[in-house]
């Protein structure tokens, strides 16, 4: 069983904790995306984000990590109901799979959080390159993750496969200790 206390890290410069996430759904478009794009826009009530960007609306966050692939996230019961209705309606246009139980969300904040992320990824996490609303699928400490730069804060949500959450948390703990020295 995954222990929230084992995942929590608080050191000078950064705080890392497990965030309780609600529903996580992956969406992969089939060939003709026009109908699906209209349905996605209706789901969130917002524009469809460009690749490596996010949009939010109707309690749903949409992360575009590839030209025809998205993660849809929600913490609210209303958002979960919208996602499941969407999944049924878009069957002819996309594969929609509930991934909620397979992922853990780690949240990192603080002035050193970008340093921690930069230590384990080839992405440029400087604020001018990876600002609020950006997202990416990448390797962090040799573990495949999704990273989302949150709006209105200096923080990130890191979605990691559940079986790797403890390893990633330990890696981030070691990195944070090394950059503070």
Image (tube, helix red, strand yellow):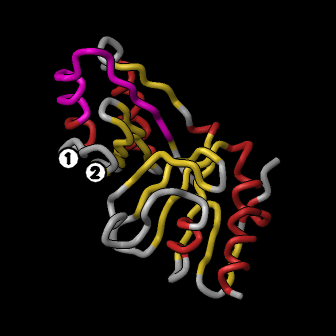
Tell me if residue 31 comes above or below residue 59 in the rendering. Answer: above
Q: Secondary structure at mark 1?
A: loop
Between disc 1 and disc 2, whose residue precedes? Answer: 1
Q: Residue at x 51, y 48 (%)?
A: 138
Residue 138 drawn above or below residue 181? above
Q: Residue at x 33, y 65 (%)?
A: 129
Residue 72, quarter of the rendered image: top left
- Asked whether the residues under the numbered discs 1 and 2 touch, taking CB atoms below 8 Å apart as contact, a structural biologist would say yes
Spot occupied by residue 11 in the image (x, y as percentages of width and height):
68, 83
Binning the other alpha carbons within 10 Å of mark 2 as few (below 14), some (14 to 19) or many (20 upward) gives many
The x and y percentages for residue 119 are: 59, 67
Quick one: 51 or 35, which is closer to the camera?
A: 51
At 77% from the left and 66% from the top, the residue drawn is 5
Q: Which mark is residue 28?
A: none
Q: Nearer the viewer, residue 80 or 73?
A: 73
> What element does badge 2 sit on?
strand
Q: Which quadrant: the C terminus? A: bottom right
Measured from the top left, where is residue 48 in percent x and y?
Answer: 22, 41
Residue marked by disc 1: 46
Residue wearing tag 2: 55
**Magenta-drawn segment:** 24-40
In this image, 137 relative to 130: left or right? right
């Amino acid at each position: 069983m995954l222990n929230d206390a084992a995942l929590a890290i608080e050191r000078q410069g950064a705080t890392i904790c497990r965030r309780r996430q609600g529903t996580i759904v992956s969406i992969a478009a089939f060939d003709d995306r026009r109908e699906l794009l209209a349905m996605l826009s209706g789901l969130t009530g917002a524009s469809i984000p460009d690749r490596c960007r996010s949009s939010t609306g109707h309690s749903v966050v949409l992360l575009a990590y590839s030209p025809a692939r998205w993660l849809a996230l929600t913490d609210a019961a209303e958002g979960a109901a919208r996602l499941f209705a969407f999944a049924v309606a878009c069957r002819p246009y996309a594969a929609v799979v509930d991934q909620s139980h397979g992922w853990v969300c780690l949240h990192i904040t603080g002035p050193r959080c970008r340093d921690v992320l930069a230590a384990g990824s080839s992405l440029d996490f400087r604020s001018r390159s990876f600002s609020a609303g950006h997202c990416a699928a990448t390797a962090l400490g040799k573990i495949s993750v999704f990273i989302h730069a949150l709006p209105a804060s200096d923080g990130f949500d890191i979605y990691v496969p559940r079986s790797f959450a403890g390893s990633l948390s330990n890696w981030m703990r070691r990195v944070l200790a090394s950059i503070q020295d």
